[in-house]
Amino acid sequence: MAEEEDQRRARRYQKDLPDDRTNFAKAWKLLEEYGHIPPEDIDAHVIAVAYSIFHYGCLGGWRFLDLYLTTAPEYPDIIARLKAGDKLLDLGCCFGHILRQIAFDGAPSTNLTGADLRPEFVQLGYELFQDKETFGAQFVTGDILNPTDTGLAVLDSKFDIVHTASFFHLFGWDDQVKIGQRVVKFFKPSARALILGRQSGRYEPLSLEAYRQQGGGRYQHNIATLQNLWDAIGRETGTKWKVTGQLLESTAPRDSDHSLAPETPVDGRPRVTLRFAVFKLD
Ligand SMILES: C[S@@+](CC[C@H](N)C(=O)[O-])C[C@H]1O[C@@H](n2cnc3c(N)ncnc32)[C@H](O)[C@@H]1O
């Protein structure tokens, strides 16, 4: 079974960087100007780092080179808030590329934290950006779904903003509710709390009844079902949330964690990315 999964991932692992680098222009600038990697060495450097942990989906799809967050409508306000002292957590941060971009755009790195299951991603992030000695962000590792793993407990009540990309979509509905409950605990009690990110979406998600009848599995949202999810998280935590966002036809580099090929229509329509911002209501 594990071998089958390994083969499936290997098939979807892109062996070369795409010819069209339009989507990666910001990453190249970051690697050159922040990571001080000579432009002629960037391809080889990126491939060497990503291949050192072969078969992991979000690396094989080169998504760690996509700095989409910089185009989110909330981004300028996030940078301003971080400069004024707010704290941001990147949940499921992988190499921490988004955190480096935020620091490059002027936020104090000491106001940034990354959390991930896998410590090797944190180490590879330092290799990718050559900043182990200089990057002031904190990284914490732990399994957000394992109640006996206390690794993430140091994050409780510390944050104003949580970024989380290609993360919630890895899980089924019930686990998403549990993760949401955990995320709520990461916020300072007084925070102007904001959760934002992007993930695989769906124009017409299954109703919860149909989803359960089909046996569960990963749940992909549109805005309405994401609001339902945050209403459920709100009921469990005594909080209220307003979901905003958009379904976008996917221009992101191939998402290797998606169970479908990139061009495969979902519900007879093109594959979509859900970009979201969830605001805490007083
Ligand atoms: C699909 S990758 C997305 C990475 C990055 N946010 C991006 O957009 O490219 C999902 C990340 O979540 C982490 N992850 C998966 N399950 C986790 C868990 N139970 N607890 C904490 N992190 C987890 C993985 O190690 C991986 O880095």
Image (spheres, rainbow, N blue to C red):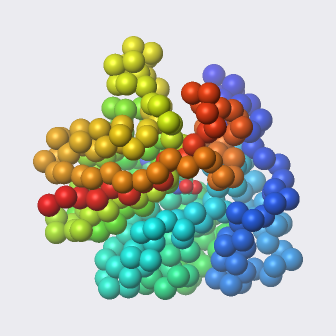
Q: Image quarter for residue 138?
A: bottom left
Query: What residue is shown at x 42% (from left), y 53% (from top)?
Result: 245
**Picture quarter with the C terminus:** bottom left
Residue 92 appears in the figure:
no
Query: What residue is shown at x 23% (from left), y 58% (from top)?
Result: 280
Q: Is residue 85 above or below residue 116?
A: below
**Is 191 on the left-hand or right-hand side of 15?**
left
Q: Image quarter for residue 279?
A: bottom left
**Picture quarter with the N terminus:** top right
Q: What x and y, as percent, mark residue 127?
A: 66, 70
**Is 163 on the left-hand or right-hand side of 227?**
right
Total marks in image: 0
Q: What x and y, as percent, mark residue 154?
A: 30, 62
Residue 241 appears in the figure:
yes
Residue with the most extreme front position: 269
Q: Is residue 269 above or below residue 166?
A: above
Q: What x and y, as percent, mark residue 171?
A: 44, 36
Q: Nearer the viewer, residue 268 or 115?
A: 268
Q: Image quarter for residue 41?
A: bottom right
Q: What x and y, as percent, mark residue 101?
A: 56, 74
Q: Nearer the viewer, residue 204 or 54?
A: 204
Query: What residue is shown at x 83% (from left), y 66% (from top)?
Result: 44
Q: Nearer the viewer, residue 124 or 216?
A: 216
**Is 12 on the left-hand or right-hand side of 279?**
right
Residue with the most extreme top position: 213
Q: Is residue 65 above or below residue 255?
A: below
**Is 94 on the left-hand or right-hand side of 56?**
left
Query: What residue is shown at x 38% (from left), y 82% (from top)?
Result: 80
